[in-house]
Structure formats: C-alpha cells, structure tokens
Image (cartoon, rainbow, N blue to C red):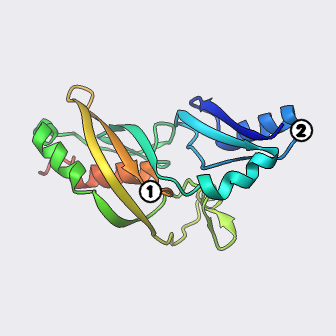
Amino acid sequence: MDGILIINKQKGCTSHDIVYQVKKMCNQKVGHTGTLDPMATGVLPLLIGKGTLCSKYLINHDKIYKVELQLGKKTDTADSEGKVIEEVNVNPEILKEENVKNILESFLGKQEQIPPIYSAIKVKGKKLYEYARKGQKIDIPPRKIQIYNIKLIKINKKEKQISFEVSCSKGTYIRSLCEDIAKRIKYHSDI
C-alpha cells in the first residue's frame, strides 16, 4: 500500500502510537506530517510506503487549531494532564470581550517562541521531555514562528476559559502560545 491515510487522532494517544499501529498493520514504512500533542485531537495525515516521498511537500504547511485555554492554573506540562504548579484567582474584569480580543490580536505576526519542556525537540542530542522527566534544567532556544490569524470564539467567565482559533506556521507550539497569552492577560488578581 502506498499513499496518504487521514487519521482523526483521538485525545490521549501520541502521533508515534498511531504511526506504530499503522506500521504494524501495513508492514510498511509509515510517517506523519507533524506531531500532535497527546491531548490534541484532529487530523493526522499518515504517509505510507512510497507516500512518504511526499513528506517534504506536506510538512512545511501552515496549521489551524481550535484551542480552549484554561486560566488560573499552571501545570508543569502546560496542558490539563500535568501537575498543577500554580493556582491564582482570575479577575473577571480581564475577561471582557474587547480586552481578550486585543490581547489575542497582539500575538499576530512573526515572533520567537520558546517550546515547552515537555516536547520532542532535541537539544544537545536529547529530547526535551527527557530532561523534564529527570528534573534537569536546560536552556531552550527560541524558534521563529508566525501567527497569521487569531480569532476569539467564546469566553466562559464562570469556568475562566477562553476558546479561540489560530492559524499559524509549522512549528508553533499551542501550549507555549497559551502560556504566553495567559501571561499577557495578567490573570493574577493584581491587575
């Protein structure tokens, strides 16, 4: 079998898990066009057999994500699965629609982003999550990314959540973007 297989990745499994399962079923070379976090759901294109030759044409494309940002809690992994390392009160005044829209739009354009420590990026020959799991500190070099469009979908003041859609360049870490947005919102009660 040669070609492209579109997978609707479910929450809780890694892109690597899916590649491994398909490779086992097809008994052929299998790759993907970009890793989705274990907590992310959505389209994961898999390249099978001679389809892997298309990788260089598909991997560099931009991405669109729908995101739900939970304010008031920070975890060590920057997602809902991590250990809570900080909790703060969220002032409802910061969740005014105009304020949130302005903050989201302030992320438009080219910028540098520091990837999360729980990621598969290699630094000094090791994946970042390997350093994180051992509690080791490492300087993470920033990456150049671009946010093309960012649009507020909904604000849930009761749950302190912001839903938005973002169109971005490859290599953008949504977990890092969420942390940066939360910092800019200044969700601490001292605003």
Reply above or below: 163 against 119: above
Residue 108, position as x, y percentages in the image: 27, 57
Residue type at the position of mark 2: Asn
Taking 97 as reference, is 121 left or right?
right
Question: Which quadrant is home to the N terminus?
Answer: top right
Task: Work out which residue is located at the far right of the displayed protein and give it.
Answer: 27
Kindly state the secondary structure of the residue where label 2 is placed. loop
Q: Is residue 185 visible?
A: no
Task: Work out which residue is located at the far top of the displayed protein and give it.
Answer: 158
Question: Which residue occupies 56% across, 30% down?
Answer: 11
Reply above or below: 11 against 187: above
Reply above or below: 187 against 164: below
Residue 75 lies in quadrant:
top left
Question: Which residue occupies 15% across, 40% down?
Answer: 91
Kindly state the secondary structure of the residue where label 1 is placed. loop
| Residue situated in front as seen by the camera: 182 or 147 | 147
Q: Earlier in the sequence, mark 1 or mark 2?
A: 2
Residue 68, position as x, y percentages in the image: 36, 35
| Residue situated in front as seen by the camera: 96 or 183 | 96
Question: Which residue occupies 56% across, 35% down?
Answer: 43
Q: Pointer 2: residues within 10 angstroms few (<14), some, or many (20+)?
A: few
Residue 118, position as x, y percentages in the image: 55, 53
Reply above or below: 166 against 40: below
Residue type at the position of mark 1: Ser
- Determine whether label 1 and label 2 are within 8 Å by CB: no
Taking 38 as reference, is 141 left or right?
left
Which residue is disc 2 drawn over?
27
Which residue is disc 1 drawn over?
169
Distance between the alpha carbons at the discs numbered 1 and 2:
33 Å
Question: Which residue occupies 53% across, 33% down?
Answer: 42
Residue 41, position as x, y percentages in the image: 53, 33
Q: Pointer 1: residues within 10 angstroms few (<14), some, or many (20+)?
A: some
